[in-house]
């Protein structure tokens, strides 16, 4: 696999901080970095040659659990030569990798892009974007307005195995789906349209959620039924919710939201 190079994920930080110049899309087992078309168009010929970048990458895990970038080197050396020197400072050389059959992310990336196995499913971030586009199409038809302000919000996956990166990714995910992009007037029109089409008995079985209650509702989907427990002599009802370990948390949240959108669309 000499066509692959391995890099510290921090190399992406400079690009992430310049969204007006670069587009960085990440998912469970893959990512794609390229120059934005608007920024590229503003550059002269010399600037275009220097600034152009298009790099595809996956993730590979060390035995200690640290996550690194697996980069297709022809993308960096041939297509993005103006950035090669910057990336060289983050190059790592080690054989201390987790075995391929134990490294799910790397295994999926190799199967799809190195071995041509297109039976590998897209990651949950890709699936969620597809659901947003479908929901926007349905609400535009039913209410004359899109529910989400954009069809392709940036839904990042954490590029490092630490709490800070996971919290950042969760915050951006919530922001992309709740804080602003949801159109309240569209939700009101959908509510009116639903009420006009169903009986009062059926209306009791319909959940129409506001942005503030959406994630509370989704969290309830993962909560076990209440059970009785005695606390200091009093019998109380308690609920338990499974919390996955940190490396799986982002994928679980994104898959939950995408699955919920699919279920809502099919009902």
Image (cartoon, helix red, strand yellow):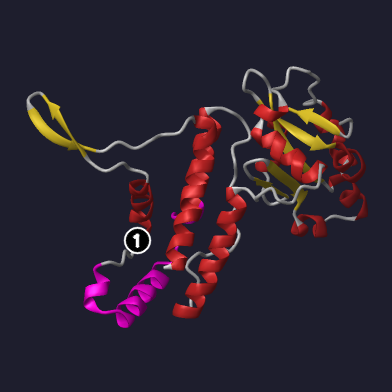
| Quadrant of the rendering where the C terminus is positioned | bottom left
How many residues crowd around disc 1 within 10 Å: few (fewer than 14), some, or many (20 or more)?
Answer: some
Report whether 63 appears left or right of 203.
right
* 105 versus 213 height, above or below: above
Instruction: Give the residue at mark 1.
Output: 210
- Magenta span: 176-204
The residue most toward the bottom is 196
Pick whichever, 221 or 23, lies toward us. Answer: 221
Magenta span includes 178? yes
Which residue: 69% across, 31% down? 9
State which quadrant residue 11 falls in.
top right
Above or below: residue 172 compared with residue 67? below
In this rendering, position of residue 159 left or right of residue 57: left
Q: Indicate the position of residue 178 as horizontal and vertical percent values.
A: 44, 55
From the viewer's side, name the closer residue of 195 and 78.
Answer: 195
Residue at screen point 89% across, 40% down: 74
Give left or right: position of 260 versus 2.
Answer: left
SS category of the residue bearing label 1: loop
The secondary structure making up most of the magenta span is: helix
Q: Nearer the viewer, residue 256 or 41?
A: 256
Q: Residue 88: give x, y in percent of width and height.
A: 83, 28
Where residue 123 appears, as percent x and y from the top left, is: 62, 48
Q: Quadrant of the N terminus?
A: top right
Q: Quadrant of residue 188?
A: bottom left
Q: Residue at x 82, y 46 (%)?
A: 53
Magenta-drawn stretch contains 167: no
Q: Going 58% across and 58% down the picture, which residue do you hit? A: 129
Q: Is residue 31 left or right of residue 207?
A: right
Q: Is residue 157 visible?
A: yes
């Amino acid at each position: 696999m000499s066509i692959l190079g391995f890099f510290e994920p921090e190399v992406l930080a400079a690009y992430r901080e310049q969204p007006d110049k670069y587009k960085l899309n990440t998912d469970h087992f893959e990512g794609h970095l390229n120059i934005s078309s608007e920024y590229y168009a503003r550059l002269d010929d010399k600037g275009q040659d220097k600034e152009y970048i298009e790099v595809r990458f996956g993730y590979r895990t060390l035995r200690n659990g640290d996550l690194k970038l697996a980069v297709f080197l022809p993308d960096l050396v041939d297509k993005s030569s103006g950035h090669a020197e910057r990336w060289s400072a983050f190059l790592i050389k080690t054989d201390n990798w987790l075995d391929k059959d134990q490294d799910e992310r790397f295994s999926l990336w190799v199967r799809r892009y190195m071995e041509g196995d297109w039976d590998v499913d897209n990651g949950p971030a890709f699936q969620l974007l597809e659901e947003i586009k479908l929901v926007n199409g349905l609400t535009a038809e039913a209410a004359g307005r899109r529910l989400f302000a954009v069809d392709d919000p940036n839904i990042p996956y954490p590029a490092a195995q630490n709490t800070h990166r996971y919290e950042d990714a969760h915050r951006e995910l919530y922001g992309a789906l709740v804080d602003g992009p949801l159109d309240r007037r569209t939700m009101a029109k959908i509510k009116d349209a639903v009420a006009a089409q169903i009986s009062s008995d059926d209306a009791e079985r319909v959940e129409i959620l506001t942005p503030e209650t959406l994630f509370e509702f989704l969290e309830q989907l993962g909560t076990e039924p209440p059970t009785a427990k005695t606390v200091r002599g009093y019998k109380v009802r308690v609920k338990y919710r499974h919390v996955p370990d940190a490396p799986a948390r982002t994928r679980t949240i994104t898959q939950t939201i995408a699955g919920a959108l699919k279920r809502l669309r099919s009902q």
